[in-house]
Amino acid sequence: MSSVTFEHVAKRYGDVVAVNDLNISVADREFLVFVGPSGCGKTTSLRMLAGLEEISDGKIYIGDRVVNDVPPKDRDIAMVFQSYALYPHMSVYDNMAFGLKLRKVAKPEIDKRVKEAAGRLGIVHLLDRKPKQLSGGQRQRVAVGRAIVRNPAVFLMDEPLSNLDAKLRVQARSEISKLHQQLGTTFIYVTHDQVEAMTMGTRIAVMKDGVLQQIASPQELYDKPDNLFVAGFIGSPSMNFFDSTIVGDGSDMYVDTGAFRLKMPADKAEKFKALKGKQVVFGIRPEDVHDPDFAPPGIHTSLVDSKVEVTELMGNEVIVYLNAKDKPFLARVDPRTKSRVGNSVQVAMNMDNLHIFDKQTEKAVR
């Protein structure tokens, strides 16, 4: 098993910087997820680790070994691609065994490894089939099985669930998480789906425009985003943002959005009083905007008059699209709410969980 380290790693294509000064240490047996929008550099980072892209600057370590000039086949990694890349003319068994045959592993050992991996993934009954006879979920399992049989030090997965339907993706997420626990191997996983990242990763590396924005546990990213981008990217629906000014005196401090004023709890007032008169961005998650009739007890709320524009009934909750004097925002409220399209309503914002960002730097103020 192995750790992985990116040390000042960069990748340039002419004048285009795809990855810029990436520094990450992945612990042995960790499950790290790279997440970010298309073009942020997450797949390029994975491909540099795999040896499929040359590194422009810096060093990549697998364990204690610098692998910059090591061929992909000698890096002791296995990669699962978005396309699965199965050989259509080969059976499932032969697809899984192919890499081992190239390495001249003995036939009894190949047979043992393939059947063990197939049993673990529940595809023993598919070993004689060709890829065209498999569903998308079955092909995904075969691609993972082909990686497992190699017993690699590091598993690399590049959006392996993107071709699956929504229900199958949920099931496959859980299977990959279980697999990580069973194998006790280092996993590095790339996705643009923040729900996948939050549910699977030990830690998440959020990237934008080739630059690492923040790396932390899922809960820390959710509770304490470092900047406006991370705050908006992590969480679904994403955080509400309002251009605002901090106003007030002493313990009576307010966030003034121009459309409404929200009183801060005493601890927040003390924390942010130095920002009095400053232009900031106020952020609050939809799950911290409540129907006052069903707000949790013991929280400090501030009421906002607004109009309901759209409601989305999700069964266990209602997503409400609201507007307060041309300031749109979302709430995730109790399904018992009486909010209906066209109604004028009051919503209660949980000010214990407010977020303040510097308007110029977009960094969180803590």
Image (cartoon, rainbow, N blue to C red):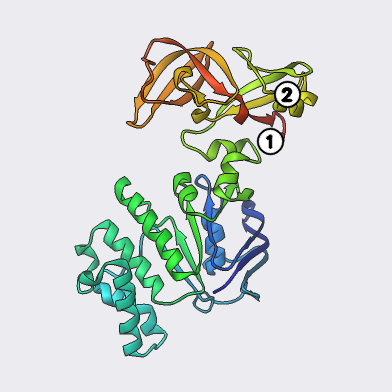
- Pick the quarter of the image with the N terminus: bottom right
Count of numbered labels shown in the rendering:
2
Q: Residue 44's spot in the image, x, y percent?
A: 54, 58
Read off the residue under disc 1.
364
Q: Nearer the viewer, residue 155 or 43?
A: 155
* Residue at the (38%, 55%) spot, across then down: 174
Q: Residue 59's spot in the image, x, y percent?
A: 67, 67
Task: Report the amino acid beneath label 1.
Answer: Ala
Q: Residue 279's spot in the image, x, y percent?
A: 72, 22
The tag on residue 269 is 2
- Is disc 2 in contact with disc 1, using a CB cutoff of under 8 Å? no
Closer to the eye: label 2 or 1: 2
Determine whether the residue tagged by mark 1 lies in a helix, strand or loop.
loop
Q: Which image quarter: residue 177?
A: bottom left
Q: Is residue 73 above or below residue 171?
A: below
Q: Is residue 4 visible?
A: yes
* Residue at the (71%, 34%) spot, across then down: 365
Task: Report the amino acid beneath label 2.
Answer: Ala
Q: Residue 61's spot in the image, x, y percent?
A: 63, 70
Q: Which image quarter: residue 3?
A: bottom right
* Residue at the (77%, 24%) spot, across then down: 273
Q: Is residue 100 above or below residue 363?
A: below
Q: Is residue 118 above or below residue 239?
A: below
